[in-house]
Amino acid sequence: MRSACVPLSDIRAAVVNSDAPAGDGGGPLRRAFVVVPLQLAKQISWLRCSTRVSGAASVSDTPTWESCFSVSLQRAWPINTEENAVFKRARHWLLPFRTKPRWRKFLAHVGPGALVAIGFLDPSNMETDMQAGADFKYELLWVILVGMIFALLIQTLAANLGVKTGRHLAELCREEYHRYVNIFLWIIAELAVISDDIPQVLGTAFAFNILLKVPVWVGVILTVFSTILLLGVQRFGARKLEFMIAAFMFTMAACFFGELSYLRPSAREVVKGMFVPSLQGKGAAVNAIALFGAIITPYNLFLHSALVLSRKTPQSDKSIRAACRYFLIECSLTFIVAFIINVSVVVVAGSICNGEKLSPADANTCSELTLQSTPLLLRDVLGRSSSVVYAIALLASGQSTTISCTFAGQVIMQGFLDLKMKNWVRNVITRFIAIAPSLLVVVVSGTSGAGKLIIFSSMVLSFELPFALIPLLKFCNSTKKVGPLKESIYTLAIAWILSFALIVVNTYFLVWTYVDWLVHNHLPKYANVLVSIVVFALMAAYLAAVVYLTFRRDTVVTYVAVSERAQGQVETGAGGTLVSAADEDQPAPFRKDLSHASM
C-alpha cells in the first residue's frame, strides 16, 4: 500500500492561513489549531496517511493534505489512519491534552491524610490538651509544635513506603522478621490500638452522659452499639464516610475557634509558649509525654502505609514520586488544620482556667478538668447550648477515631498474621477489651479516674511508638525494600535524631517515676525488692528490643522494579494494566483488598 509524505511547510501554511476557504480544509484546520498547540506542528517533520482516504480515486492516487486532515478530524485527533502511523514524537506532545489536570490528580490522592489527622482530634488529645492548658497555661505549646512536625515527617515516610513498595508496614515486617519477633510486634501494635480505643470509649461515654443524662458507666456500655451503627454507614461508600468525618472535624474546630476569638489571648505569651521549650512545675514532664503520645500514635504508621495502597498509582518511577508529593501536600494541609485546633484547645483552657476573674466554682472545675466538664470552656460563645454542641462534637470525634482504629487493627492483623476478619467483629473484640478497664475505673474512681486513665493511655502510646517507628525508618532507607527510591539522608537523619530523643526521654521518665514511687511508698522492703526486680527486668527487655530492631540488618529482599510489579499484577489479575515508564496516565495496579479502607 502506497503512502504519501506531507511536507511540514504545507501543514504550517494551512494552520496559520486564516483566509483559506472552508471547503479547501482551512475551516477544519483552524478548528484543529484551537485543540493542538503550535508546538505539535513544529515537532512533526512529516505525516504518513493511508491511500484509502476520501478523495483518493484509486490506490495509485496521491492523497492531498486536505483529505488527510479531513479524515483525521473526522476520526478525532491525533491523526489515526488505517495504518495508524503517527510518530511517537507527536504522541509525546499530545500527552498533556489527554492527562488529568494536576488539581484533579491531587484530589484523587486526598483522603488518607484526613483519616490519620482525625486521630489528632480524638478524646485523648482533647483531654491532654485541656489538662496541659489548665495546669501550665501556654508553656507546653512547643510540645504540640514539635509533635506535629515529627508526626508529619514520619507519616509522610509511612505513606511513601506504601507507595514505593506496594506493601504496608505490617506486611513488610512479616516478611522481614522471625515469626516470634512478628508475634511480639503484633502484640505491641494491638496494645497500641486498644490503648487508643480506651479514650474513645470514655469520650463517647461522657457525650452520652451530657446528651442523654445517663450515668457515665451506662455510656461506656452504650459505646458498643454506637460504633457498630456507624460502621454500618460505611456500606454507603467510603468517600461519603470520609466527608462525614471531615464534617465532624470542622464542627469541633468551629466550637473552639469561636471561643478563641472571644477570649483574645495574649499573642506574645502564645508565641513564647510555642517556641520557647519549658518543663517547669510538677507534672510538666508527665503532661508533655502524654501530649506527645496522643499526637504520634503507632497504629497510624501502619494505617497510613496501607491507605495509600487503595489509590491507583501508575507504575513508573516518575508517577510514584509524583504520588508521594501529592500525599505530602494532602497530609500537610490536614495536619495544619489539626495543629491549629489542638493549639486552640490548649489556649482556650489556659486562658479560662488561669484567668484573674475565675470564680471559686470554676477554679475547682479547672483543678480537675475532664471531658465531662469541658462545656465550661465554651459557654461564653455557645451559652446554654454549649453542653449540647460540645457533646455532639465529642461524640463525633470519638466515633470517627474508632473507625480509624478499626481499619488500623484490621491492617495490623492482616499484615502480621495474614488473618482477615470482618470489620464489625474486629471492632466488637477491640471494644470489649477497651471497655473492661474503662468500666472498672469509672465505677471505682468516677470521672476524675477516667481522666487519669486517658492520660495514662496516651503515655503508653508514647512508649510503644519505637516498635513501629524503627522498622519504618529502616525500611525507608533499605535498598532491599525500596530499591533506588530511598528517602533523603537528611530527612532520615532528622527522623532518627527525634526518635532517639523520644526513647531517651521515655527511659528517663520510667526510671524517674519508679524511683519517686519507690521513695514514697509504704510497702515492706522485701516487696520493694521484688517489685524492683520485675520493673528493671521489664525495662531491660524494653531497651534490648529497641536495640535489636535498631541494629539488626535487613536480610529479605522484597523490592520489585515498578515495571515488573505492574506486569506481575496484570498476570495475576490484580486489576492493573501494564504501563511504560513514559506514560503515567494509564490505569495502574492497586490493592483491591485495601480499597474498603479508602477514605
Image: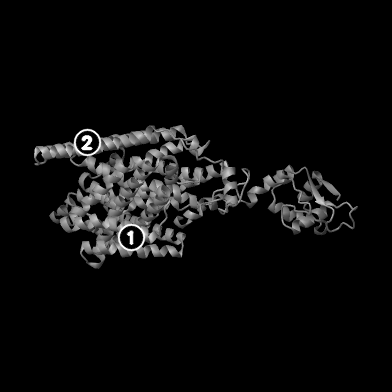
User: Is residue 258 or residue 537 the one in the foreground?
Assistant: 537
Which residue appears farthest toward the bottom when viewing the image? Answer: 212
User: Is residue 175 or residue 180 the one in the foreground?
Assistant: 180
The residue depicted at 23 percent of the width and 36 percent of the height is: 537
Could you tell me residue 252's position as x and y percent?
33, 57
Could you tell me residue 40's position as x and y percent?
71, 46
User: Is residue 356 or residue 4 the one in the foreground?
Assistant: 4
Q: Image height check: is 423 above or below 181?
A: below
Q: Amino acid at mark 1?
A: Val
Classify residue 290 as left or right of residue 367: right
Could you tell me residue 532's position as x and y percent?
17, 37
Write down the quadrant of residue 554 in the picture.
Answer: top left
Colour theme: one colour
Write down the quadrant of residue 270 in the picture.
Answer: top left
Could you tell me residue 434's position as x and y percent?
28, 55
The earlier-in-sequence mark between 2 and 1 is 1
Q: Amino acid at mark 2?
A: Phe
The label shown at residue 536 is 2
Q: CA distance from mark 2 to mark 1?
A: 35 Å
The quarter of the image holding the C terminus is bottom left
The residue depicted at 60 percent of the width and 47 percent of the height is: 567
User: Is residue 223 or residue 571 the one in the foreground?
Assistant: 571
- Secondary structure type for disc 2: helix
Q: Is residue 36 visible in the rendered structure shown here?
A: yes
- Reading the image, the residue beneath label 1 is 428
Classify residue 291 as left or right of residue 586: left
Q: Residues within 10 Å of mark 1 (few under 14, many from 20)?
A: some
- Secondary structure type for disc 1: helix
